[in-house]
Image: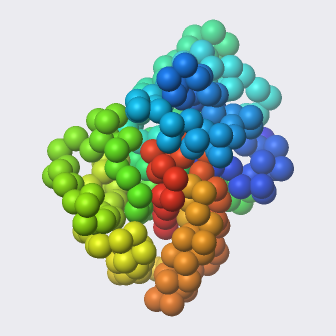
């Protein structure tokens, strides 16, 4: 069966995914003061980070419209899947579902399924890779959905950021205890809950110590690591991503490792120097 995977632009596509012809990005957009930035192949991370650093205001994002999702579903592929940011963090999931409903009303029946990643960034990438793995193995549409939903249940996402300001100002840290430790260089390392919200796991003085602590948590919490793909995304800090990879590899052996630079939305929240890991 032919298939297509639509991933909102918080999820990074690897070169292999781009070249396969089975993946498409549903672009979110970002506003930084008077600048309107579409998170597509034209996104310039360095220029974006300069604009954010120069602005006194917090950047704001907008999810793809239901109509945009509907158009992405309009293709020759028999099986269509969408993977979105956690529904707890963005309206992208609801927009993708509404786009599916609009498509069915406009064009009739089609096998379309929308996955709420309950994650973000590289977590969405891994879900897209899992869908492709299932499809290439010849699983039925229903079995792909069942298998990938089970995969999402056991997936864990963690991150360390230089600054939590964007998350805080955009209301993504609701319910989290306040971090009033900037002067002491205290860096919290965070994780995603099973529901797709964000929680603080712990903290350390300095980002490298926080990365070391996060590596310990990753190694401790993962089950059957030899069967898992370790995926890391970073915002303009490849060295930190490589360091995190090496620290995790000291503790566990995994099936494969993927490292990518963040796209626009992930860059907005991770800020310069942020690192995200999913396994």
User: Is residue 267 or residue 34 the one in the foreground?
Assistant: 34
Q: Is residue 132 above or below residue 9?
A: below
| Residue 129 in the image: above or below residue 96 | below
Left or right: residue 48 versus residue 188 is: right
Residue extending furthest bottom?
A: 250
Total labels: the figure holds 0
Q: Residue at coordinates 50% horizontally, 23% vertically from top-left?
A: 33
| Residue under the point 62% across and 66% down | 238
Q: Position of residue 224 (x, y in %)?
A: 46, 80
Which of the 4 image quadrants contains residue 254?
Answer: bottom right
**Relative to 30, is 205 on the left or the right?**
left
Q: Which quadrant of the figure has residue 28?
A: top right
Residue at the top extreme?
106
Colouring convention used in this rendered image of the protein = rainbow
Query: Residue 6: x and y, percent?
Result: 64, 37
Residue 7 visible in the picture: no
Q: Is residue 47 visible?
A: yes
Q: Position of residue 245 (x, y in %)?
A: 55, 77
Q: Residue at x 51, y 28 (%)?
A: 32
Please report the residue visible at 29 percent of the width from the left and 73 percent of the height from the top.
Answer: 205
Quick one: quadrant of the N terminus?
top right
Q: Is residue 109 above or below residue 55?
A: above
State which quadrant residue 90 falls in.
top left
Q: Residue 111 appears at what percent x and percent y?
A: 62, 32
Pick the residue in front: 40 or 258: 40
């Amino acid at each position: 069966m032919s298939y297509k995977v639509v991933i909102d632009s918080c999820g990074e596509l690897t070169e292999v995914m781009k070249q396969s012809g089975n993946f498409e990005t549903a672009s979110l957009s970002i506003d930084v003061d008077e600048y309107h930035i579409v998170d597509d192949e034209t996104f310039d991370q360095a220029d974006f980070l300069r604009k954010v650093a120069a602005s006194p205001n917090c950047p704001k994002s907008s999810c793809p419209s239901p109509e945009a999702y509907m158009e992405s579903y309009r293709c020759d592929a028999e099986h269509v899947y969408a993977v979105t940011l956690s529904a707890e963090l963005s309206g992208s999931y609801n927009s993708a579902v509404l786009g599916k409903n609009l498509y069915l009303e406009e064009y009739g029946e089609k096998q379309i399924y929308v996955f709420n990643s309950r994650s973000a960034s590289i977590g969405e990438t891994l879900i897209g890779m899992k869908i492709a793995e299932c499809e290439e193995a010849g699983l039925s549409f229903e079995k792909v959905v069942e298998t990938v939903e089970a995969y999402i249940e056991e997936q864990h996402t963690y991150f360390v950021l230089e600054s939590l300001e964007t998350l805080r100002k955009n209301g993504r840290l609701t319910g989290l205890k306040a971090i009033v430790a900037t002067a002491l260089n205290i860096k919290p390392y965070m994780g995603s809950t099973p529901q797709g919200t964000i929680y603080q796991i712990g903290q350390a003085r300095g980002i490298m110590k926080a990365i070391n602590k996060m590596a310990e948590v990753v190694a401790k919490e993962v089950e059957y690591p030899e069967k898992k793909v370790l995926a890391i995304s970073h915002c303009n800090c490849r060295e930190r991503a490589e360091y995190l990879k090496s620290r995790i590899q000291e503790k566990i052996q995994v099936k494969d490792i993927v490292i990518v630079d963040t796209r626009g939305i992930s860059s907005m929240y991770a800020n310069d120097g942020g690192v995200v890991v999913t396994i």
